Amino acid sequence: MDGIIFNIQKFSLHDGPGIRTTIFFKGCPLKCGWCSNPESQLEKIQILYDQKKCIHCQSCINACQHKAIQMINDKIIIDHQKCTGCLSCVDSCFQNALDYEGENKKITEIVKICLQDKDFYEESNGGITISGGEGMSQPTFLKELVKELKKHDLHLAIETTGYVQPNIFKELAPMFDLILFDIKHYDSYQHFLGTNVHNELIIQNLKWAVKQKIEILPRIPVIPDFNASLDDAKGIAKLLTEVQLSKVQLLPFHQFGEKKYELLNREYRFKNKKALYPEDLQEYQQIFLDKGIDCFF
């Protein structure tokens, strides 16, 4: 069975306990404007274009049998709906102005890569983390992958948006030792403005997972002009208290993914926003601490 993956990151230290291998699934139902992995949102192979390397030879246009590439105002424009991911355009570009994100991988291949560092997992109490995108957006593939990884006694975590149909979430969530659960906003309308989806389904799945006593670490990406105010902190703290979670991790906004938007020919709404650091969020953090919630970075 194949799944579409856009990265396998070894020696990861930020996606669960210990040393981990993080597997990044392609495909996500949310469209967060600040997403540091915008290449993760579409569940198919995507072509990246670096205009600085392009010499306008148009060899890629001639190579594409699906007419998915145009030259507009001296810039290559790729129609990702027409593109089939055959990579003929990438192969034809001798300037390396074209690259791609996403690759179909077999479960056996992924498991083999993960097992290469099993000694490090054991020494550090680490393991495997599924990230993305949204890992549960490829539910059948994820289920079979997890089954194979479990045969090797590995600690398994998943980072999820929680925006998953309840029948799928209820089947997959209990298979993991730890759920890194993204909490982006307490207010449904504001959540929609930032992510293009409302949060009722997310909260429903979160409450269910808590009742099942699955280990959950809620994580808040703190984003300027979205959920970074002290009132936002109070609202999210209230939500966590209501669902009976007493721990949360803050993920300050950063600009690590900015270049990717240019390569995907997408507008980046947060281009001129300053990155946040723990020292910028001391008052924000204190609101959770005052509510008896262990809040850390």
Image: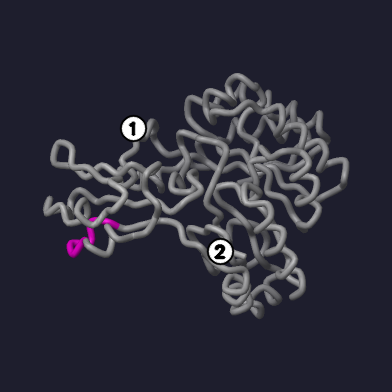
Q: Secondary structure at mark 2?
A: strand
Q: Position of residue 249 (x, y in %)?
A: 65, 44
Q: Is residue 9 a member of the stretch shown in magenta?
A: no
Labelled disc at residue 25: none
In the current view of this chain or complex, which residue is farthest to the front? 65
**Residue in the image at 47% along x and 41% along y:** 35
Q: Position of residue 39 (x, y in %)?
A: 44, 48
The three-letter amino acid code for the residue at tag 1 is Asn
Q: Nearer the viewer, residue 277 or 26?
A: 26
Q: Dot 2 corresponds to which residue?
A: 12
Q: Nearer the viewer, residue 110 or 85?
A: 85
Q: Check the image and report above or below for 67 versus 288.
A: below
Q: Specify few, some or many for label 1: CA neighbours under 10 Å numbering under 14, 14-19, or 20 or more.
A: few
Q: Quadrant of the N terminus?
A: bottom right
The three-letter amino acid code for the residue at tag 2 is Ser
Q: Check the image and report above or below for 173 versus 7.
A: above
Scheme by which the image is coloured = one colour
Q: Check the image and report above or below for 165 versus 154.
A: above
Q: Specify few, some or many for label 2: CA neighbours under 10 Å numbering under 14, 14-19, or 20 or more.
A: some
Q: Dot 1 corresponds to which residue?
A: 272
Q: Quadrant of residue 114?
A: bottom right
The number of discs equals 2
Spatial CA distance of label 1 from label 2 is 28 Å
**Residue in the image at 77% along x and 38% along y:** 166
Lower sequence index among marks 1 and 2: 2
Look at the image and give the residue range highlighted in magenta.
Answer: 93-98
**Residue in the image at 44% along x and 43% along y:** 254
Q: Quadrant of residue 97?
A: bottom left
Q: Is residue 94 a member of the stretch shown in magenta?
A: yes
Q: Position of residue 104 (x, y in %)?
A: 50, 62
Q: Position of residue 36 (x, y in %)?
A: 46, 45
